[in-house]
Image (tube, rainbow, N blue to C red):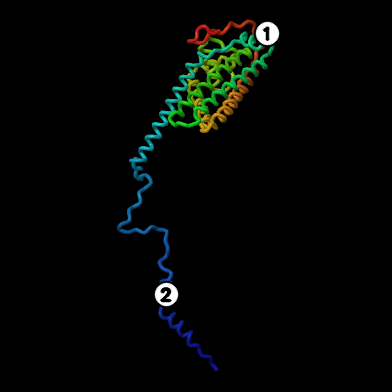
Amino acid sequence: MKRSTPPRKHRFRKAAADGDPIEEARDAERGRTASLVAAEGPGTAARPADGDLPAAPAPTGRLAAVRDGVRKSSRGAKARIGQIADRIIETAPRIPVRDLATLRRHFPGLGPEQIADKLVSGACKASSTVGAGVGAAAMLPVPPAMPAELATEVTGVAAIELKLIAELHEVYGLRPPGPLTQRSTAYLTAWTQERGIEVTRPATINAALGGQMKRELRQQIMKRMVRNMPNLLPFMVGAAVGALMNRRDTKKLADRVRKDLRAHQVSWDELGELPPLGPPEGVPGLP
């Protein structure tokens, strides 16, 4: 007996013969085919070429005010650093420096290393006192006075360390040649570069007298001011931080200078009798 086809299957065959409405219904349920091409219509603007991009509009209003404020503060900071550099350059020849004979009288019976240790210890105490004093002045911080406080600290510590560098050169028998102004410039370069001056190499002396010195001096001042920012912390915290950081920085500078000077040290017996150092500029009568 031949089997008959179930009625439910006749429905699908008939639908397939009529143009596959089932697939059309499924396509209608899926929606439109996705495409990565941007739709173009009457209201769509054409995309400009890479070379035809419009220039960014000039900042106006609050953004322009912020930009102008940043530029003015940058110019003010550069001018302030230049003023500090000029002040240090003017102060360097006026710093009283003891010559070797005076140092040997002040520290009788001690050799070069022992006298150098005494000089470094005294300079560390002095720079620590300056840092503590500036930190104590900033106990109740006043923002307009902070730049002046940082400038005072940098100038004071620079004078202490310049005196230390000059007297270390005397102790190790490496006094730079030339008059007071030339020696002061050499010591200033040693402070800026954080190393000793090789008096046996004239190139180092000439470099100290060049225009590069002032540029390096400004960089050193900027580095010192950024490093001394924690000294302005309020409630006497800055005093402790300033004392500790200044002592550490002066000790580090002295160690670097002494390392360079030891490599070219001249013994006291070979030096003979050195001429005494004259009084600082503008301070007559000092020994």
Nearer-the-camera pick, 272 or 233: 233
Quadrant for the C terminus, please: top right
The mark found on residue 25 in the picture is: 2
Kind of residue at disc 1: Asp
- For image coordinates 43% across by 83% down, the residue present is 14
What x and y, as percent, mark residue 164? 58, 17
In front: 221, or 119? 119
For label 1, count other residues whose C-alpha is less than 10 Å away and answer few (under 14), some (14-19) or many (20+). Answer: few
Name the disc covering residue 269, or none.
Answer: 1
The label on residue 60 is none
Tell me the amino acid under the disc marked 2: Ala
Query: Is the residue 179 above or below the residue 85 in the image?
Result: above
Q: Nearer the viewer, mark 2 or mark 1?
A: 1
Examine the rendering and report whether any part of residue 271 can be seen: yes
Contact (Cβ within 8 Å) of mark 2 with mark 1: no
- Residue 222's place in the image compared with 55, above or below, is above
* 199 and 3: which is toward the camera: 199
Give the residue at x 68% y 8%.
Answer: 269
Ranked by sequence position, the earlier of labels 2 and 1 is 2
Q: Assess disc 2: are there few (<14), some (14-19) or many (≥20) residues with their C-alpha within 10 Å of its C-alpha.
A: few
Disc 2/disc 1 C-alpha distance (Å): 112 Å
The kind of secondary structure element at disc 1 is helix
Q: Which of the image's four quarters has the N terminus?
A: bottom right
Say which element carries label 2. helix
Which residue corresponds to the image point at 41% horizontal and 77% vertical from the top-left? 21
Which quadrant of the figure has residue 67? Answer: top left
